């Protein structure tokens, strides 16, 4: 696995969580749009409406982000650490990263490439 693939794991997992949440919400919306007769007794409970896989996936994402963050923290260059954190832990766009750092999109991408190379050296 390359350094970039390793770093992108959190973004992929975050997208999967958001996709599952959207799917779950569509099922909830569908289930409340159809009414029916209920003859059984309704008991109030504090049962979570989320599927178990959502909680597991969120926990996995948190662990993965911590692991990635620990390796990022070992980089010497502060700007490289910031860019990798913004891109792979906060999932910001190139434009947003540039705006936050007062750099052009092109310069951010150049720094990113250097940061990924340095990350790969540390990771190995």
Image (tube, grey):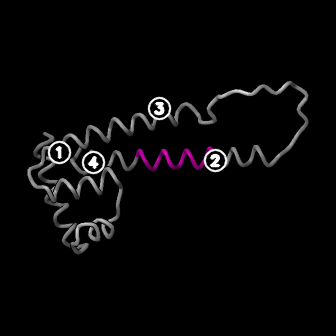
Tell me the distance, in whole angstroms, between the alpha carbons under discs 4 and 1.
13 Å
Tell me the distance, in whole angstroms, between the alpha carbons under discs 4 and 3.
20 Å
Numbered range of the magenta stretch: 13-25
Q: Is label 3 in contact with label 1 (beta carbons under 8 Å)? A: no
Q: Is label 2 in contact with label 4 (beta carbons under 8 Å)? A: no
Nearest-to-viewer mark from 3 and 1? 1
Tell me the distance, in whole angstroms, between the alpha carbons under discs 2 and 4.
29 Å
Nearest-to-viewer mark from 1 and 2? 1
Q: Secondary structure at mark 1?
A: loop
Q: Is label 3 in contact with label 2 (beta carbons under 8 Å)? A: no
Of residues 42 and 84, the one drawn nearer to the viewer in this rendering = 42
> Which residue is disc 4 drawn over?
7
Q: Quadrant of the C terminus?
A: top left
Q: Most prominent secondary structure in the magenta stretch?
A: helix
Of residues 43 and 73, the one drawn nearer to the viewer in this rendering = 43
Badge 1 crowding class, 10 Å Cα cut-off, few under 14, some 14 to 19, many 20 or more, is some
> Which residue is disc 3 drawn over?
56
């Amino acid at each position: 696995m390359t350094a970039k693939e390793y770093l992108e794991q959190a973004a992929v997992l975050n997208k999967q969580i958001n996709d599952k949440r959207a799917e779950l919400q569509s099922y909830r919306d569908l289930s409340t749009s159809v009414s029916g007769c209920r003859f059984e007794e309704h008991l109030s409970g504090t049962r979570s409406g989320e599927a178990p896989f959502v909680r597991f996936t969120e926990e996995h994402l948190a662990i993965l982000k911590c692991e990635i963050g620990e390796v990022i923290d070992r980089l010497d260059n502060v700007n490289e650490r910031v860019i990798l954190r913004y891109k792979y832990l906060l999932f910001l766009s190139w434009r947003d990263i540039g705006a936050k750092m007062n750099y052009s999109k092109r310069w951010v991408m150049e720094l990113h490439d250097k940061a990924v190379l340095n990350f790969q050296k540390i990771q190995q």
